[in-house]
Amino acid sequence: MSKKKRILTGDRPTGPLHLGHYVGSLKNRVLLQDKDDYEQFILIADIQALTDNYDNPQKIKDNILKLTLDYLSVGINPGKSTIIIQSQIPELAELTIYLMNMITVAQLERNPTVKNEIRQKGYRENVPVGFFVYPISQAADILGFQANLVPVGEDQLPMIEQSREIVRRFNSLYGQTFVEPKEMLSEVPRLCGIDGKEKMSKSLNNTINLSDSSDVVYEKVMKMYTDPTRVRATDPGHTENNPVFIYLNVFHDDKREIKDFEDKYRLGKVGDIEVKKRLAEILNNFLEPIRQKREEYEKNIPLVNSILKEGTERGREVVQQTMSLVRKAVKTDYFG
Ligand code: ATP
Ligand code: MG
């Protein structure tokens, strides 16, 4: 039997998962867990989440269970995918330390995603060291699992590239130890926010969450940013870069109906409210089965906790195997 390829993906337990997560990554994970030649690990990156939330550890702790409910409700099957809590695998922290020697401060400073996040968070000169080096700890997550494939959204591409740089450096210094991971982008690698900002993101308060009630979804859609140049419903409107039409195209199968809406919108023959009402309906139809599944699991929290516990144990074994290779390579295996 040939060895299965490994997949490592994950999320920060910083808040509820949203539509961007679904199309950017979760959808692929649900498909990939059915492939026989792959083994999928899903990492809840609580240590990474603490790098910019160290002042609020309770929030991170509370979000671990919520995140797991999000996974299970979209169809992640714990019989097929292994869900892991990062902090419970201390070997990942150990690996991070070794990998820190494989990359320079200048390389980290060039990471465009981190640069952007530092700006967003307003850190200026006061970037916590832990936050600055989180791409290294993320590389350790990927390499610790010897992952071949990493399904991610577009913002994560620099992390995967830096992970590969770290692998090359490590392997050339100490001999072949790690495999080079490859990213896997979805058809929608970046979904915009309801405010029209380029990324729907937990930190930007512009999300529609998988756990939002139908009323909340309706309200959020009604507040959505549309075409700022359009004052009256009879003005010709723009459908490009208009989140309402972007979401319609991503979440609605009836392309004829969308085309019809687009044509009318451009001619000023349909108002924002009418299109939005239809969009809210479409999104709620999409979210309804997810809500129902969540309710099932919410009734059985001990089961959810045992899924986390067993997944983490299985994951730790895998990382421990990697670490025995690493300690040999860097000659810290003193006692065998
Ligand atoms: P935070 O603001 O705390 O960083 P986030 O919304 O960026 O939260 P993460 O947990 O950092 O979410 O990201 C988890 C995964 O989801 C990553 O692979 C990321 O690329 C993907 N992802 C997040 N937001 C989007 C989006 N709007 N479109 C596509 N993929 C996304
Ligand atoms: Mg993020």
Image (cartoon, rainbow, N blue to C red):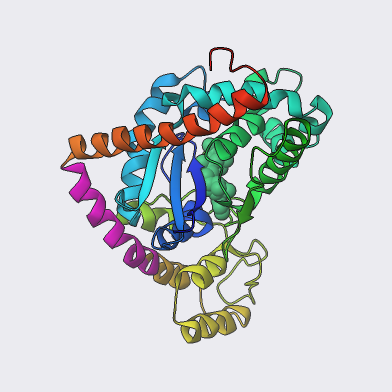
Relative placement, left or right, of 268 versus 106 is left
Q: Main structural element of the magenta stretch: helix, strand or loop? A: helix
Residue 47 against residue 284 in the figure, above or below: above
Residue at the farthest right position? 106
Q: Is 302 or 227 nearer to us in this picture?
A: 302
| Count of marks placed on residues | 0
Residue furthest to the front:
336
Quarter of the image where one finds residue 267 = bottom right
Q: Nearer the viewer, residue 137 or 153?
A: 137
Residue 287: say if magenta: yes
In the image, is 29 to the left or to the right of 244?
left
Instruction: Please state the horizontal and vertical placement of residue 127, each as a whole percent of the image.
Output: 69, 21
Inspect the magenta stretch and tell me whether residue 31 lies in it.
no
Residue at (66%, 70%) from the top-left corner? 240
Q: From where the camera sits, is residue 269 visible?
A: no
Residue 273 seen in the figure: yes
Say which residue appears at 55% left-offset and 22% top-offset: 93
Task: Compare residues 77 and 130 and report the one nearer the observer.
Answer: 77
Instruction: Tell me the residue at 73%/37% (across/down).
Output: 171
Task: Read off the magenta span.
Answer: 281-299
Q: Position of residue 242 (x, y in %)?
A: 61, 65
What residue is at 76 percent from the left and 31 percent from the top?
A: 108
Q: Is residue 151 left or right of residue 119?
A: left
Q: Nearer the viewer, residue 283 or 89?
A: 89
Coordinates of residue 87 in the picture (x, y in percent): 45, 25
Task: Give percent across and percent down for residue 61.
Answer: 38, 26
The answer to whether 301 is drawn above or below residue 265 in the figure is: above
- Residue 274 lies, with reference to residue 40, above or below; the image says below
Q: Residue furthest top?
A: 335
User: Which quadrant is home to the N terminus?
Assistant: bottom left
